[in-house]
Image (tube, helix red, strand yellow):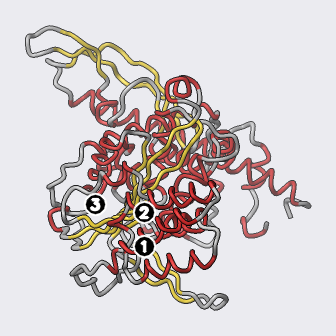
Amino acid sequence: MITENAGDFNRLEKEIYKFCCKIGCELLKTALETWDSELAQSRDRQIYRHKGKRKTVVKTVMGEVEYERNMYKHRSETGEYEKYVYLLDIAMGKTGNGFYSGLLSEQIVQASCEGAYRSAARSVSELTGQNISHTAAWRVVQELGKRVEIDERSVKRHETTKKLEAKLLFEEQDGIWLNLQGKSRKEHGKSKEMKLGIAYDGCISLGTSKKTGKTRYKLTNKVACASFESAEKFVKRKEAVIAKTYNTDEIEMRFLNGDGAAWIKQSISDETVHFQLDPFHRNKAIRSYVINPEVQEQITELLYEKKIDTLLDYIEAMKNSVEDEREQENYGTLLTYFRNNKDGLIPCHRQGHNVPKAPKDKEYRRLGAMESNIFTILGNRMKGRRACWSIDGGGNLARLLCLKFTNKLSDTLSNLTSLVLPHRYAEEIEIKMSAKQVALREGKGYNGFKQMTIPSEMKWLKDMVSMKSLLDF
């Protein structure tokens, strides 16, 4: 036995992990410098004039990798040398001196979406070979949030390549008020509403719970977007996000669910969009402004019977019949709210539309998932705990949160942060051996750990690998 207690084993595990990370950094350094040498040999010497080597650093999940790459002076079409370039940086798709690898960036973003930047930095530092600060985590989130925004704006709406087709699209929108800080607080006030919109093409059943007997459902092909922008800009962003996933030319009908806010109704662009007042907010308004249970029941019954004009007349009559000023004011507020959303008081599924048939693998259910999504996507991370945001900082994080909770974060970040290595680094390495060499290296007595190079300062590791087999541990 190497160790007699768990503490020793934990130390051993950490030391081995650090050692493996160190080897990985050396391998990556060698690969990058070899690639740079190949680019130097194959470059057009008439255009790129060699000006020596410069050091830079790439931060990876294994640790910081410091390496040298060749710098060149670039000759323009006019024949003049006008700027300095690094062919390796261009080939890797990176700019600037020092950067984070795509894998490390994704780890930081994933952790930042789960909790505060300090917690994210501590988590990443403990689980990788890299030590980062909360400021570094914030900067990575801001940079990638900006890239996501550019990616959203660059979507071509009528481009149909590799997009989903849906005859009916469900949309739900709502807002959440977040505290502001710094210059944003001075400009916009103590808080500002962040708008959130989701869209999906149906639901699939997750089965029935044995405890409650209720069937749970999952929204399919859900997309989401959020921002502090004005209503007009938000609608454009929302349409761009939808167009990135769906072929909008194939959408025949849209059902829109919201709490009746003016900015939500700006999504009603034509007769194919049908609005309904969110059932949660509608029923909450009835309970909040009507004290008498019998009146609540009567209002609910008129809603169910689709007698909207009678309902509005009934509420106005109740307002005029009560003597208490507070009750009159409450009835008046409810009456105004229902009049402003008269066309949406009847749910979409009961409005009598000729709804397209649902695909075989999914079903169409009633709208009303927005309150859950407000908390899941934004509220759980961005509201409470005395959290305050700037307009830009909160917007960048919100974009990443939308991607995370629609299962698109990993793929999006891979596309935005990937480094393209030469093809040979992705090829399988085949080692040819003679029959004699195979017997020496593949026999039962071969211990590959003894062949590894170990730093002199790690005497404990040398002692460990000198044993017959790791299985004896």
| Residue in front for this viewpoint, 437 or 245 | 245
Determine which of the numbered discs, if any, sits on residue 338 in the image.
Answer: 2
Q: Residue farthest to the top?
A: 80
Give the SS element for disc 3: helix
| Residue in front for this viewpoint, 120 or 79 | 120
| Residue in front for this viewpoint, 170 or 35 | 170
Image-based side of 316 in relation to 17, left or right: left
Position of residue 315 relative to residue 263, above or below, is below
Give the SS element for disc 2: helix
Between marks 1 and 2 in the image, the one whose residue lies nearer the viewer: 1
Residue 333 can be seen in this image: yes
Between marks 1 and 3 in the image, the one whose residue lies nearer the viewer: 1
| Residue in front for this viewpoint, 89 or 329 | 329
Image-based side of 102 in relation to 235, left or right: right
Give the SS element for disc 1: helix
- Where is residue 20? Give x, y as percent: 62, 48
Q: Amino acid at mark 1?
A: Leu
Q: Amino acid at mark 3?
A: Thr
Determine which of the numbered discs, if any, sits on residue 354 in the image.
Answer: none
Between marks 2 and 3 in the image, the one whose residue lies nearer the viewer: 2
Q: Which residue is mark 1?
A: 311
Upstream in sequence: badge 1 or badge 3 = 3
Q: Which residue is mark 3?
A: 245
Does the residue at mark 1 contact the one at mark 2 (Cβ under 8 Å)?
A: yes
